[in-house]
Amino acid sequence: MLEAEGSVMNSLWIAAIVVGCLIAGALLGTTLRAKLPERHLSQDALDVIKLATGLMATLAALVLGLLISSANTARSSVVSVVDQTVANAGLLDRYLAAYGPDTQEAREMLRHIVVRRAQVRWPAEDFGPPEPPLPSNRNDWVELAQRLLQLAPRDDAQKWLQGQALALANQLAVTQRLVISQLQGNDLPTPLLLVLIVWTTAIFISFGIFVRMNVTVIIALSVSALAVAAAIFLIHELDSPFTGLIHVSSASTHALLAVLGK
């Protein structure tokens, strides 16, 4: 729960900082308009400022669009991996059940693994009694595979089921590593965020230079600042697929646990 709330608060703080920088930029532009000599605000100078602003606005829009698309694609990949994990775990449990009572211990191990993974991914939700974390030198999927290797098939059917179960356990181990690698590479780079804030702040400075402030202009600039902040907030939230407001649903995992081992 605290981790999820911390992720949302972090995203909101970043969005608030962006809004503050943009509004401050617009106010700075207004101050510069009042302080600069008229020769610095000639038509030619304003035309050049507009061209420079248009260039920065285009670059900022492209970068924001690419970041949102990339973050959404990464989130979709995580959703796909989670769904595949749930499907493989459910199928593995069915194979073990078909094998016979010798797999009861392995099925219990599988349930404990699923619960442990779910509690790590969705810490704010209830998946039953807390599972103790494994030491870094242990891998629960490898231990499950070792337990499956200890089975002694008595006929061809059990031998086939054992082979299928081992293949699924291997796939589950691979998808787990894939989720970890995707989550580790999803963070929004701080230098890129700073560059975006500088670009958009410079754009708002130019807005303050171009026009005299009134209620309509202030409302328009405020809405624009909120739009930019919302885009960055969205990127940050999409980069945290298991926490925050836009998180991957745990419904399929809950449904799996309702039938796992039964």
Image (spheres, rainbow, N blue to C red):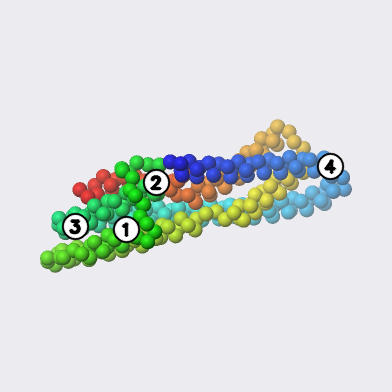
- Measure how far apart labels 4 and 1 are at the Cα level: 67 Å
In this rendering, would 20 be left or right of 110?
A: right
In this rendering, would 61 be left or right of 155?
A: right
Which residue is label 4 attached to?
Answer: 35
Q: Position of residue 227 (x, y in %)?
A: 59, 42
Identify the image quadrant of the N terminus.
top left
Depth check: 238 or 173 in front? 173
Residue at figure coordinates x 60%, y 41% from the top left: 16
- Disc with the residue nearer the chain's start (1 vs 3): 3
110, above or below 24, in the image: below
Residue 28 shows in the view: yes
Q: Given this view, does label 2 or label 1 mark the residue nearer the observer? A: 1
- The crowding category of the residue bearing disc 1, from other C-alpha atoms within 10 Å (few below 14, some 14 to 19, many at least 20), is some
13, above or below 58, in the image: above
- Disc with the residue nearer the chain's start (3 vs 4): 4
- Measure how far apart labels 3 and 2 are at the Cα level: 28 Å
Which residue is label 1 attached to?
Answer: 140
Element under disc 3? helix
Residue 224 shows in the view: no
What amino acid type is highlighted by mark number 2?
Answer: Trp
Q: Given this view, does label 4 or label 1 mark the residue nearer the observer? A: 1
- The crowding category of the residue bearing disc 3, from other C-alpha atoms within 10 Å (few below 14, some 14 to 19, many at least 20), is some
